[in-house]
Image: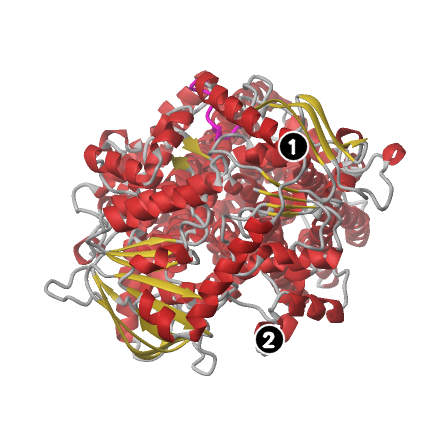
């Protein structure tokens, strides 16, 4: 009999370890195969790299010797994460830097993954004749090996976990004297240790590989979104704004990348429950049906909640898109908002959008809380129903079956409690996936009209009966019936009234406007200079070379032809000077000349120039025209849009446009002789010049002379004395916290809006709940073998304690929601206030991507992840230590192992956090760089396509995606490195406890408490896993709070309103301006830009301020609006020192036409009256006065029309805005001498005082 029982035990152990051994061998083989082929399949043979097969990886990543050790690690190193040791050691010794991180392996890089994605997508398109293939199944086919391998590890984990209750039952039988053989207790203790180690190994590989898989998906989706935006059609751009595209990469791709980590939970939980039900049936028989019924009821009750969660998540993402779009637009145009004193209005608009977002966030989080409550109470309800069924079915309860049941339930309760998280992640991923799929399926620009070379063809541009429409609607053409033939080397001017289609014609040549009719052919390499200068963040040299190799002689000639030599001498580092975002530290003329230099250096065949000389003064324009167009481009084909009539006589041909048509094409003299429309255009230009010349000279000549002399002299001084140090570049490296910040970010999060109160309420509720669970099991352990306690009483008290603890679960869930919503609202409000009150110097030196990454991805983590992450990390810690406490109470000897283990665990966690926190901080800064590059690429998409540089920019994007993926990869690998070591220690504690029970004489321990202790001990591993996992995840997520906080305390501008010193409502009445010894410097340690200017402007004067680039013209205007505060001296307007009144009172009384056009995405009405102050009748009136009434009336939706608006119409819109507001004093700062082809001075007669620069 004993021999049979021994054989049974041996058979059980063999059966237990055989599947695990086979799965481990299979997993190791799959690991080797997966890592060996690089995960790229045959993609490398089907697709060429962007440049050359041999150099692309080196160009993107540098030396292959610096590749991650994971790429070359053996099976043991991969399984134990030994390959992470060098980085963990480096991170502990010093704060990690980006240079300390090895490159990702070839199979993990975005480039490789994107090629696999393209290959699978193309293959599925070939197999599917109609319609687009499923994006989801395409992604699955890309990652099927990774899914299979991680699935094997997930299955192994479930099998090893499920062996725990079986071992527990055997151990209780041993304690009752029912052992199979003499040393069975020792064998079971060793078996427990091996099972827990195997469980740890399989779970760690499962989680690591799914994280890695998610990273790969995120990387190639980010690459796919970037590639798609490069080809996005104009109609699609109206549906997908730059802010939404930013969201696709920074938020949606992140959410989809999180899904693989949770994917196997969707089926392993079901498998685990089935195995658990089988074990329960063996323990309590038919009472298992009651447990199954409760589980089914829980799932059924959750179904409608899941649908609501999906709905609310969709609405939340839509609201987030709208808010981010408004944020992006406001941040880009912040200078305009400050000049117009619109900050308060736009801030209120964004706050309103945020409240809508908060409404959906609250709804989503509340449903998530209900889900959490439902599934956390599920194990309690299952146990109550099961024990009640046992009573009704007269099934006897003893220590063996009760604690087999309890152990089984404790092992599955954590996966069950994770179901709400799984549901939440699945819903978020589904919504994000739908959004990205919709974007990737959006219409693209039609085929390229350009050919790189057409040797022997003397007509590089040919259009035959062509019509073009921005929205691809033939009934609404932007250009109609265009016939155009341009010979090689011909110089063609394009002129016409405002909005006649000149810029659209150039866009059509570039292939930017969909063709609805006719044929078009463009042969040769093109270069394009846009109407509004697009400048990259980088050096002047980078912007000119634009990806081309350096030819020193050609480069020097380019600088001379574009009149940039003197400008570069004035910059601190010449052409190596870092240009701020959008060329913020260059004047309008300098930016345009950099654009011209970029085009000239390309040595193209065709040059498309969209009014490039309007941003420079008349002398420079003439010099550039002669040296650039007629000199450097003498043998090139040139199409030039211009309003400068003086240049027209030298052109070979002139295209006169009106209402989207070429009404005449002839030489200057022929048009002047035979075309009335052209005569009107030339006469209008002459009339403008005449009116300007007839303006009488003001009587205050001395003051004019003084200001000219002062600025000239100080411009010279500025050039000679400014010698900034190498650290004085405008764009600084993004700051990040360094080292261990301790509890600072957590305290920052909790001190928002009674956060400590709601967090304390949640923690106390959870502690009471845990105590209730321990009380339940203690009651059962104490009385299950007590004959004086009836089964009814045993069960009733157990159920009563459970019901009592359930209410505290509800309090905890609701406290989490309130904590999250209130804290998110408070943090965003402070961030928004800080950003809108920040001085312009902050925006000049901070790339937009850094700010947008905080208000998109970081804020999304603060909104959705941190509240529940915070509570669950604390709750999981309480659970883990309560498990250890119960184990120690029953077998106090375990403290000899557990106390050192806790000390070692804390040291290990600190060792880990030293690297983990820096990795997540680096992840944040690299994400900002990625977002900044994406934002710049969206803004400059037309220029990038015109120069055919899409591949280079795409390659740069891939490099930034990999740089962002690197720290994330090492962070989750470090997390698994830590948890695997902690799990091994907790397995040792459990085994040691079991060993003590086996060593001590039989009867030492109550069998009930043996069962209770080991049931808690078996869940020690999983509770420690969830504890450390949640804590590590929260430590990573709290970095987002750090990053948001960095921009919450930006030094602000002066007060918007000073109540005790407000000007009169009609100030300024006269418009007199007095400058008294005005001195300006941009930073405390910087030299003066304006050196003691003293002069006066009388009301009604028309003042011209002239001077070369860098002489201080823009600085003077900035000082009048207090964009920069005076270092010394005063500015007095109508007897009021402007520094003594609030900024809103000052800026709202002045007016300015900014140098750079600024139109908001919206209707004509919104652009004319963004504050909604005027009636439609007033707007139509002003449209008539500015000769735009017919143009707007022709649009189908009138004032509510959207669409393409010329930069010149923008100028008129700005003037109309001032007519509406009835300014008494206006500063006009047009782009150049003839920005519009209308009589500008006539439009300014309504103002009392004007300064024209």
Q: Is residue 392 visible?
A: yes
Residue 1231 is situated, as x and y percent measured from the top left of the image, at 51, 48
Q: Secondary structure at mark 2?
A: helix
**Earlier-in-chain disc, 2 versus 1:** 1
SS at mark 1 in the image: helix
Residue 1201, numbered circle:
none
Using the image, tell me which numbered label, if any, was put on residue 1119. 1
| Residue 665 located within the stretch drawn in magenta | no
Answer left or right for 34 relative to 856. left
Extreme right residue here? 1060
Q: Residue at x 58, y 45 (%)?
A: 1229
- What's the colour scheme? secondary structure
Q: Which one is in front, 328 or 637? A: 637
Q: Is residue 528 above or below residue 616?
A: below
Q: Which residues are magenta?
A: 723-735
**Residue positioned 52% across, 30% down in the render:** 986
Q: On the rendered structure, is 143 left or right of 470?
A: left
Q: Residue 1092 appears in which quarter of the rendering?
A: top right
Which quadrant: the C terminus?
Answer: top right
Q: Are there few (<14), some (14-19), or many (20+) residues within 10 Å of tag 1?
A: some
Could you say which is closer to the camera, residue 1090 or residue 439? Answer: 1090
Q: Quadrant of residue 407?
A: top right
Where's residue 156, x and y in %? 41, 48
Relative height, residue 1127 to residue 807 (above, below): above
What residue would you read off at disc 2? 1190
The one nearer the camera, 325 or 982, is: 325
| Helix, strand or loop for the magenta stretch, by majority | loop
Q: Is residue 322 left or right of residue 89?
A: right
- 4 vs 943, nearest the viewer: 943
Identity of the residue furthest to the bottom in this view: 475
- For disc 2, the neighbor class at 10 Å (few under 14, some 14 to 19, many from 20) is few
Q: Are marks 2 and 1 in contact (CB under 8 Å)?
A: no
């Amino acid at each position: 009999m004993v021999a049979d029982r021994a054989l049974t035990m041996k058979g059980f152990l063999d059966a237990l370890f055989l599947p695990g051994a086979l799965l481990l061998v299979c997993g190791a083989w799959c690991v080797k195969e997966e890592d060996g082929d690089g995960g790229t399949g045959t993609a490398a043979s089907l697709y060429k790299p962007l440049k050359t097969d041999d150099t692309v990886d080196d160009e993107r990543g540098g030396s292959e010797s610096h590749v991650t050790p994971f790429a070359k690690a053996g099976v043991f190193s991969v399984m134990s994460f030994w390959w992470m040791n060098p980085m963990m050691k480096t991170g502990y010794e010093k704060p990690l830097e980006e240079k300390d991180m090895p490159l990702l392996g070839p199979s993990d890089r975005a480039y490789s993954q994107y090629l696999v994605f393209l290959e699978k997508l193309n293959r599925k398109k070939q197999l599917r004749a109609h319609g687009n293939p499923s994006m989801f199944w395409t992604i699955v086919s890309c990652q099927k090996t990774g899914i299979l391998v991680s699935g094997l590890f997930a299955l192994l984990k479930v099998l090893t976990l499920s062996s725990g209750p079986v071992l527990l039952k055997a151990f209780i039988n041993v304690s009752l004297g029912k052992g199979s053989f003499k040393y069975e207790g020792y064998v079971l203790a060793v078996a427990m240790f091996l099972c827990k180690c195997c469980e740890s190994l399989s779970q760690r590989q499962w989680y690591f590989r799914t994280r890695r898989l998610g990273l790969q998906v995120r990387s190639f989706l980010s690459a796919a979104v970037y590639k798609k935006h490069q080809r996005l059609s104009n109609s699609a751009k109206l549906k997908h704004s730059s802010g939404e595209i930013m969201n696709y990469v920074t938020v949606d791709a992140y959410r989809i990348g999180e899904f693989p980590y949770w994917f196997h939970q969707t089926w392993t939980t079901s498998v685990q429950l089935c195995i658990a039900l089988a074990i329960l049936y063996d323990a309590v028989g038919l009472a298992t049906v009651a447990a199954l019924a409760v589980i089914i009821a829980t799932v059924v009750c959750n179904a409608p909640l899941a649908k609501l969660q999906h709905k609310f998540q969709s609405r939340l993402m839509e609201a987030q898109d709208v808010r981010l779009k408004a944020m992006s637009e406001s941040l880009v145009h912040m200078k305009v908002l400050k000049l117009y004193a619109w900050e308060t209005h736009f801030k209120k608009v964004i706050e309103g959008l945020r409240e809508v977002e908060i409404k959906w966030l609250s709804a989503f989080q509340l449903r998530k809380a209900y889900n959490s409550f439902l599934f956390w109470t599920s194990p309690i309800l299952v146990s109550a129903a099961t024990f009640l069924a046992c009573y009704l079915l007269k099934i006897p309860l003893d220590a063996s079956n009760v604690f087999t049941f309890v152990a089984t339930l404790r092992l599955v309760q954590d996966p069950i409690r994770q179901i709400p998280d799984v549901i939440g992640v699945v819903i978020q991923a589904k919504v994000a996936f739908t959004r990205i799929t919709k974007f990737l399926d959006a219409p693209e620009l039609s085929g390229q009209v350009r050919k790189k070379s057409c040797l022997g063809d003397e007509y590089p541009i040919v259009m035959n009966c062509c019509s073009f429409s921005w929205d691809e609607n033939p009934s609404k053409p932007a250009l109609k019936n265009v016939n155009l033939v341009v010979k090689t080397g011909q110089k063609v001017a394009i002129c016409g009234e405002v909005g006649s289609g000149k810029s659209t014609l150039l866009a059509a040549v570039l292939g930017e406007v969909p063709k609805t009719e006719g044929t078009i052919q463009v042969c040769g390499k093109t270069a394009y200079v846009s109407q509004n200068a697009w400048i990259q963040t980088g050096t002047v040299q980078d912007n000119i070379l634009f990806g081309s190799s350096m030819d020193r002689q050609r480069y020097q000639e380019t600088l001379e032809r574009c009149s940039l030599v003197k400008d570069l001498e004035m910059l601190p580092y010449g052409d190596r000077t870092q240009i701020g975002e959008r060329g913020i530290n260059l004047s309008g003329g300098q930016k345009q000349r950099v654009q011209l230099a970029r085009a000239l250096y390309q040595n193209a065949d065709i040059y498309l120039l969209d009014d490039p000389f309007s941003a420079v003064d008349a002398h420079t324009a003439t010099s550039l025209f002669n040296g650039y167009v007629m000199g450097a481009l003498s043998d090139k084909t040139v199409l030039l849009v211009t309003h400068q009539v003086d240049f027209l006589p030298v052109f070979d041909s002139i295209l006169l446009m009106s209402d989207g048509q070429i009404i005449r094409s002839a030489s200057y003299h022929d048009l002047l002789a035979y075309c009335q429309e052209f005569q009107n255009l030339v006469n209008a230009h002459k009339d403008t010049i005449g009116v300007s010349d007839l303006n009488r000279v003001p009587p205050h000549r001395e003051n004019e002379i003084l200001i000219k002399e002062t600025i000239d002299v100080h411009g010279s001084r500025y050039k000679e004395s400014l010698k900034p140090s190498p650290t004085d570049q405008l764009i600084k490296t993004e700051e990040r916290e360094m080292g261990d910040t301790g509890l600072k970010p957590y305290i920052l999060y909790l001190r928002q809006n009674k956060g400590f109160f709601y967090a304390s309420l949640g923690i106390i509720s959870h502690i009471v709940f845990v105590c209730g669970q321990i009380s339940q099991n203690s009651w059962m352990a104490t009385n299950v073998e007590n004959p004086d306690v009836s089964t009814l009483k045993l069960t009733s008290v157990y159920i009563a304690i459970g019901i009592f603890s359930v209410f505290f679960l509800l309090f905890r869930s609701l406290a989490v929601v309130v904590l999250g919503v209130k804290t998110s609202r408070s943090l965003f409000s402070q961030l928004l206030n800080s950003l809108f009150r920040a001085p312009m110097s902050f925006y000049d030196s901070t790339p937009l991507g850094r700010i947008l990454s905080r208000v998109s991805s970081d804020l999304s983590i603060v909104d959705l992840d941190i509240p529940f992450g915070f509570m669950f990390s604390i709750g999981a810690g309480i659970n883990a230590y309560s498990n250890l406490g119960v184990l120690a109470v029953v077998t106090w000897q375990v403290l000899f192992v557990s106390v050192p283990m806790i000390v070692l665990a804390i040291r290990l966690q600190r060792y880990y956090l030293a690297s983990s926190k820096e990795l997540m901080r680096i992840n944040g800064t690299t994400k900002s760089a990625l977002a900044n590059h994406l934002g710049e690429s969206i803004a400059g998409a037309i220029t990038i396509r015109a120069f055919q540089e899409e591949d280079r920019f795409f390659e740069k994007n891939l490099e930034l995606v990999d740089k962002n993926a690197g720290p994330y990869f090492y962070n989750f690998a470090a997390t698994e490195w830590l948890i695997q070591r902690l799990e091994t220690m907790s397995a040792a504690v459990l085994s040691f406890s079991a060993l003590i029970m086996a060593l001590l004489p039989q009867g030492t321990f109550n069998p009930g408490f043996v069962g209770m202790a080991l049931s808690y001990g078996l869940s020690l591993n999983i509770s420690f896993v969830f504890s450390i996992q949640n804590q590590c995840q929260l430590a990573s997520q709290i970095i987002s709070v750090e990053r948001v906080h960095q921009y919450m305390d930006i030094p602000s501008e002066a007060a918007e309103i000073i109540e005790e010193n407000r000007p009169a409502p009609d100030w300024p009445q006269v418009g007199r301006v007095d400058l008294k010894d005005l001195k300006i410097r941009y930073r405390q340690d910087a030299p003066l830009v304006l050196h003691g200017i003293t002069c006066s402007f009388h009301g009604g004067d028309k003042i011209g301020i002239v001077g070369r680039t860098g002489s201080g013209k823009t600085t003077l205007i900035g000082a009048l609006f207090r964009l920069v505060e005076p270092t010394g001296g005063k500015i007095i307007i109508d007897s009021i020192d402007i520094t003594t009144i609030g900024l809103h009172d000052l800026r709202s009384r002045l007016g300015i036409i900014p140098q750079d056009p600024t139109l908001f995405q919206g209707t004509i009405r919104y652009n004319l009256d963004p504050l909604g102050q005027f009636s439609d009748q007033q707007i139509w009136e002003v449209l008539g006065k500015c000769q735009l009434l017919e143009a707007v009336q022709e649009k189908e939706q009138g004032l509510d029309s959207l669409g393409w608006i010329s930069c010149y119409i923008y100028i008129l819109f700005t003037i109309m805005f001032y007519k509406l507001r009835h300014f008494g004093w206006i500063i006009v700062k047009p782009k150049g001498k003839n920005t519009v082809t209308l009589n500008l001075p006539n439009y300014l007669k309504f103002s009392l005082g004007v300064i024209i620069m």
